[in-house]
Amino acid sequence: MTIKKLLIFLSILIHPLIPPLLSQIKNPTNATYFTNRALCFIKMKKFESACQDCRRALDMDQNLIKGHFFLGLGLMELQCYDEAIKHLQRGDDETLDLSLTT
């Protein structure tokens, strides 16, 4: 079996398990969990859900780079370009600030 066929097989096998994994976050005070789930939603092309999770993560931590970046990606796909640019720029600014302090 080639690697490509194996990956297809695994994605078919795992696909039914994804919704239960995405449905509930056990620690709703951890912003990283929401950005991780947002990335899953982006990969599944569920951009509104991704944006919702990113906004929730950013409510907890306004400087969260992944939150701004993933929100920007989701908003771009929803054709909310002005807001997307603001969040992508904010994520870029946070990255720059982080690199200057380390």
Image (spheres, rainbow, N blue to C red):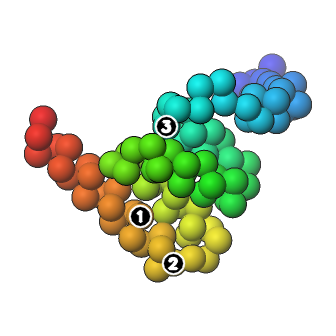
Q: Going by the image, does 33 lie left or right of 24?
A: left
Q: Nearer the viewer, mark 1 or mark 3?
A: 3
Q: Secondary structure at mark 1?
A: helix
Q: Could you tell me which residue is drawn at 50 percent across and 31 percent down?
A: 30
Q: Residues within 10 Å of mark 2 (few under 14, many from 20)?
A: some
Per the rendering, the mark at residue 87 is: 1
Q: Is residue 60 visible?
A: yes
Q: Nearer the viewer, mark 3 or mark 2?
A: 3
Q: Which residue bears the numbered disc 2?
A: 81
Q: Which is more N-terminal, label 3 or label 1?
A: 3
In the image, is residue 75 above or below residue 94? Answer: below
Q: Which is more N-terminal, label 2 or label 1?
A: 2
Q: Is residue 5 visible?
A: no
Q: Going by the image, does 62 lie left or right of 50?
A: left
Q: Amino acid at mark 3?
A: Ala
Q: Amino acid at mark 2?
A: Tyr
Choose between 3 and 26: the one closer to the eye: 26
Q: Could you tell me which residue is drawn at 33 percent across and 65 percent down?
A: 89
In the image, is residue 88 above or below residue 4? Answer: below
Picture coordinates of residue 90, whole percent (x, y): 33, 61
The N terminus lies in quadrant: top right
Choose between 15 and 68: the one closer to the eye: 68
Q: Which residue bears the numbered disc 3?
A: 31
Q: Going by the image, does 19 lie left or right of 48?
A: right
Picture coordinates of residue 22, whole percent (x, y): 73, 35
Picture coordinates of residue 84, whole percent (x, y): 48, 70
